[in-house]
Amino acid sequence: MERISHNDGEIVDISFKTTLIFWKLYDSYLVYTSDEVKKIFQQDPEYSRKLIDGYYFENLEGQQIPLKWIATTGHLFFPTCLNISEEDFKCKDNPEINGKIRIEAHLFPEGVFAMQARLDFDFMKIEQLIIASNPSVVILSDNMNMKEKLDHLEEEIINFLKTKNLSQKKSFGEKASPWHHNWIWWKSNPEIPIKEFDMDGKFFKYALGMCTRSDKWRHINPENYQKIEKVVNLSPYFSNCVYITHPGNCIIPSKEFLDPNAVKNTIIDVLFAAELGNVQRFLILDHLQSFNFKRLEMEKTINTIDKEEEKLDLDELIKKFEIIEDDVNAIVLDIYKDLQVVRTPRLIFTSVYKTKILKRMIEALHGFDFYDNLMSLIQEIRDSLTRARDGIRIKADEKETKLMNSLNILFVIGLAAQMVTMFYDVEWGNFGVGLIQIVISVFISIILLLILRKLK
């Protein structure tokens, strides 16, 4: 039995009624718009039944609450959503930890999509909730764990889309597929004021423990932790908590946010932004990985040139570097295109705090660090390509100079030989014959020179 001291007395057996939302992000390496992929699903009898109209949040009463966005181009950036399944779940080796799970697929433009698993719990202790936050121990009705199930569903969707003749992006190396989780607290038993879960509250370590999915939550020192990972309450609304750390999010809404009529300009917008922020972070992470593979390939080519300089055909090497450079430039264009899709200025909240909140969220998601690293890596690769290309051209120029010197010597020797021939022909009275021989010799030398330069 858990006992926690409190100024108003002793609280026994604190438990929470929560929703856990898991996102696993994928890149299908397919290119499509929201309208294109929605039409594809509408034409399929199986998937058409699973389409969800609009982007909304569903509260505990099952009411669908639309997100209140005012961007006129917002529909271009919303994902196409599929309600895949709804069933019971339980935790491996802990059957008393159970609840309802709803699995959705959110397909964002340009091939990135999130498999979302929403787990609704009855009242549970924090230790139980932390156990349930491990995807591999959440067992579904078909005895498949949640991690396997989401991967299986992702593969099914990608294979289905590949049959629709969508254009494909290049894939370099292993695919990135990061996880992210988000807790939403609805009630506590006994009831505790939300301010006690804020950073200065008595139970902040509860929020911090769930936000970091840490089984060491009892021993977490919030002050020391905040020195390692900056934690701030991102909610602009009184008596609400929104924490976003690198591992996950924790949202504790107040009672008024359970009413769908009061959702406009509320915490639900922040929930949606957290998902978009992670999609953006995934795109940058995935492209950084692609660049690293390209850089390894480029360095291998450069090392090959250094070791086998005399054995390699310079024209082929130059061509290979040009291909690599084209690939890098194509990836750069893809990055900017993908970032445009989830570009933060387009994510306009109805909240007057939108700019401040978004910047703090991106900072908490390490988006600025990823972006700075990305720009640094792009410049590093381009500098390496320039140095490698310049080095090859110098080597090619040196070889061309040596060849031209040899040809010039050959030409001079041939011309001298003809002059000698002419001298002897003149001496013996055959000046006309000697002149013809010189003209023919010079003509043949020019042809040979042109042929050799062409063969070079």
Image (tube, rainbow, N blue to C red):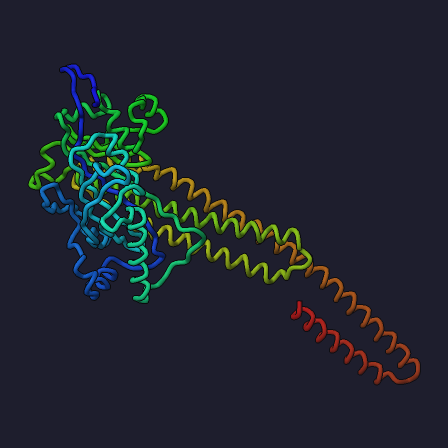
Residue 362, image x, y percentages: 30, 38
Q: Is residue 333 above or below residue 127?
A: below
Residue 134, image x, y percentages: 30, 39
Quadrant of the image occupied by residue 228: top left
Image check: 117 left or right of 333?
Answer: left
- Figure quadrant of the N terminus: top left
Image check: 335 left or right of 253?
Answer: right
State the residue at coordinates (34%, 22%). 224
Quadrant of the image occupied by residue 45: bottom left
In the rendered image, is residue 343 in sight? no
- Figure quadrant of the C terminus: bottom right
Quadrant of the image occupied by residue 38: bottom left
Image check: 324 left or right of 126?
Answer: right
State the residue at coordinates (61%, 56%). 393
Q: Is residue 246 above or below residue 156?
A: above
In the rendered image, is residue 147 in sight? yes
Residue 29, image x, y percentages: 36, 57
Q: How many marks?
A: 0
Residue closest to the eye, 100 or 291:
100
State the residue at coordinates (31%, 24%). 220
Q: Is residue 280 above or below residue 218?
A: below
Residue closest to the eye, 228 or 426:
228
Residue closest to the eye, 367 or 452:
367
Residue closest to the eye, 7 or 109:
7
Q: Residue at the right extreme?
A: 428
Residue 206, image x, y percentages: 24, 27
